[in-house]
Image (tube, rainbow, N blue to C red):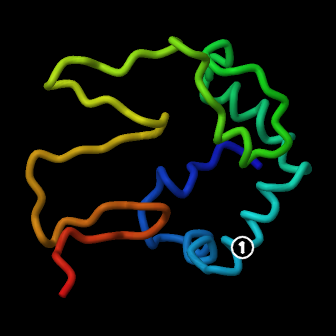
Amino acid sequence: MGDAASTYESEPRRSLNQWLESRPLYDWILTAYQNSRLSRRKIAPFIRKHRIDMNEFEPVSYHSYAQFFERRFRPGARKFPAESAAMGAFAEARYLAWDHVEAAQEFPVKGRSLDAAPTP
C-alpha cells in the first residue's frame, strides 16, 4: 500500500480517489467494513503509526476498527485544562484554528474544499 498521504493530508479535489471517497456508496461500504470483525486487523498498525499509548485507555478487546475509535480513557488519565486561555479537546483529533477568516478562504475537510462564505 505504501506511505501515500491520506485524503486528510492532501490537496482537496485533486484526485480520483478523493472524488470516489466523497460518494455516498463508498461511504456506506467503508462504514460496513469498519464495523465488521475483519477490520480489527487495522487497529494495531494504527496504534503503532500514531504512537498511541494504550495504557491511557480502559482495557477492552475491540471487535471492529469503528469500536476502537470509541475507546474510553481510564479515569484520571487526562485532565481537562482549567486555564481560560487553554482549549481543551473532548476527543483526540487534529484541531485547526484561525484568528481571522476571509469569505473566499477554503478549508480542506475530508477530501473536499469548504469555503467560509455564509450560505443563503
Q: Helix, strand, or loop for circle 1?
A: helix
Q: Would you say 45 lies left or right of 50 here?
A: right
- Which residue is depicted at the point 47% across and 50% down? 9
Residue 2, placed above or below residue 52: below
Residue 100, placed above or below residue 91: below
Residue 65, placed above or below residue 20: above
* Number of marks: 1
- Which residue is depicted at the point 71% across and 73% down? 28
Q: Would you say 72 lies left or right of 76 here?
A: right
Q: Position of residue 73 (x, y in %)?
A: 59, 23
Q: Would you say 38 lies left or right of 97 here?
A: right
Q: Position of residue 81 (x, y in %)?
A: 29, 19
Q: Position of residue 57 (x, y in %)?
A: 65, 21
Q: Position of residue 77 (x, y in %)?
A: 53, 13
Residue at the outermost right position: 38
Residue 45 position by quadrant: top right
- Quadrant location, the C terminus: bottom left
Residue 62 position by quadrant: top right
Q: Are there few (<14), some (14-19), or many (20+) residues within 10 Å of tag 1? A: few
- Which residue is depicted at the point 65% across and 41% down? 69
Given residues 41 and 9, the one toward you in this image is: 41
- Which residue is depicted at the point 79% across and 65% down? 32
Q: Amino acid at mark 1?
A: Trp
Q: Which residue position is annotated with label 1?
A: 28
Residue at the outermost front position: 75
Residue 39, placed above or below residue 77: below
